[in-house]
Each structure stands twice: as structure tokens, then as C-alpha cells.
Amino acid sequence: MTNEIIELMNATGFNNGAVKAAYEDLIKRNPAENIGDFGEVTDARIAEYKEKYGKTYTDEALKEGIRAIIQEEKEKAEQVINEAENHVTTKVNMIKETAERALHESENLSTDEITRRVYFNSQMTNELNMKLDHVDSSVSFATVLNEYLEVAKLDKYKALAINNNLYLFNNVIKNLDESYRVFATGAFEDFKIQLDQIVTPSKLKIYRQLKEEMNRYAGNSGAAARLTMRFALDKYKNEYGI
């Protein structure tokens, strides 16, 4: 199965090897495998124990020994899960902190840069208001989208200004005749995707996606392993009263 973030890293020459290696390690892990073959190992030890002592121990003494085996294997499995969780948590935190730092630095603009962006944004707001005021169909709307996509490709500051004024396009869609809205909405969604590719550097896009994905990893790395172990323990509880 392909992974969008890894593909983007490879396609753009993403140069943070530590982050890439940590992420590749995370996506290759199957949390349910953290405990190894808990059920199989425990079953094998129980069978061996029964074979060795089944004819000499009382039923209660035999169950007591079996319960001790289950407890010992449970503690081993829990230790493995905890170690795996710590390993995942360390990597998740490193990736997330690196991504947040990169995203923060990208927003830490100089006074001159802020002034320039505010100027272009104001100019673009006025320009788009006049241009969009004449849109009365999905065709004329798509024409404006194509025109400003070309503008965005040629000028970084105009691209950022267009991106900051996307609400103006949304307002136009709301005021179009209902028969035009479906096509206009689809065209606008495609426009936003292409515009985002222009205004967001590939490296920042990767960090943005990594940050979102790391939030999903948080606190959940051992859940599948614990559930797998729980199923086995429920079976032992019914059989041996643990």
C-alpha cells in the first residue's frame, strides 16, 4: 500500500532524514504484533505443564500452576507493549515537534514581508471584487478561476493574496443560480487544490500533514495489542478462573 506522505517526501527530495526514518518506522509497525504470540506461547506452556504434572497434581494444584504461567506471560507481554508504546511516543513527539517548529518558523515573517503581503492582499481584494461582480454563470466563474490560477503561478505575492481572498469566490457561488452551483463548486475545489500547491512549499506541506497524522497516533499505539491480549485472557478466565 502506498503512503501519500512518503511519496511526497520522495518526489520532493525531503531532506530531513531523521524525520523520514522515524515516520517510516511508525507506519510499518503493526501494534497488534507488539505482544508477539502471547496466546500461542501461553497455550504451549500450559500444554507442556499439563503433560508434565497432569497425572500427579490435583486439579486445583494444576490450575494454580497454570494461573501462575498465565500471569507470568501476561507481565512479559505488558512489558513488551509498554516498551513499544514508549518507542512510538518518542518518535511521534520528535516528528510532531520538528513539524511544529518548521511551521512556526515559516510564519515568523519580517516587518517588510508582512507589509508587502498586506499591500498585495488589499489590492487583490479590490481587484477580485470588481472581477467577480460580473460573474453570472458557472462558465464565467470558471473563466475567472483559470485567469487567477495563471496569475498565481506567475507571482508569489499575488498567489498568497488570492489564497487569502477565497471567501470572495465562495460568496459568488452562493449567489449563483442553483443550476450553476454544482459545476462551480467542483471547479472551485479543483482551483483551491492547485492554488495550495502553489502557495505551500512541498516541505511545509509535508510537515503540515505529519503534524495532523501524529495527532492521530497520540495515546493509541498500544490499544490493538492490549485488545488482542484481552481476548486471550478472557479465554483463560473461563477455563482457569484467573
Image: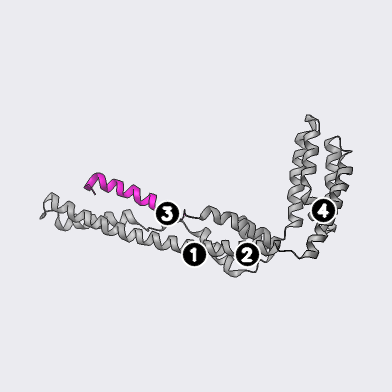
Residue type highlighted by circle 4: Asn
The residue to which callout 3 is attached is 32
Mark 4 element type: helix
Q: Which of pointers 3 and 1 indicates the residue nearer the eye?
A: 1
Q: Which tag, 3 or 2, sits closer to the chain's start?
A: 3
Is residue 113 within the magenta segment?
A: no
Q: Main secondary structure of the magenta part?
A: helix
Q: Which tag, 2 or 1, sits closer to the chain's start?
A: 1
Mark 3 element type: helix
Q: Looking at the picture, how far across and down is residue 155, in whole percent? A: 84, 58
What residue lies at 76% left-to-right and 65% top-to-bottom?
110
Q: Which residues are magenta?
A: 220-242
Residue type highlighted by circle 3: Ala
Alpha-carbon span between mark 4 and mark 3:
51 Å
The residue to which callout 2 is attached is 101
Q: Looking at the picture, how far across and down is residue 210, in whole percent? A: 60, 58
Alpha-carbon span between mark 1 and mark 4:
41 Å
Residue 199 occupies quadrant: bottom right
What residue lies at 54% left-to-right and 65% top-to-bottom?
94
Mark sitting on residue 121: 4
Q: Is residue 146 visible?
A: yes
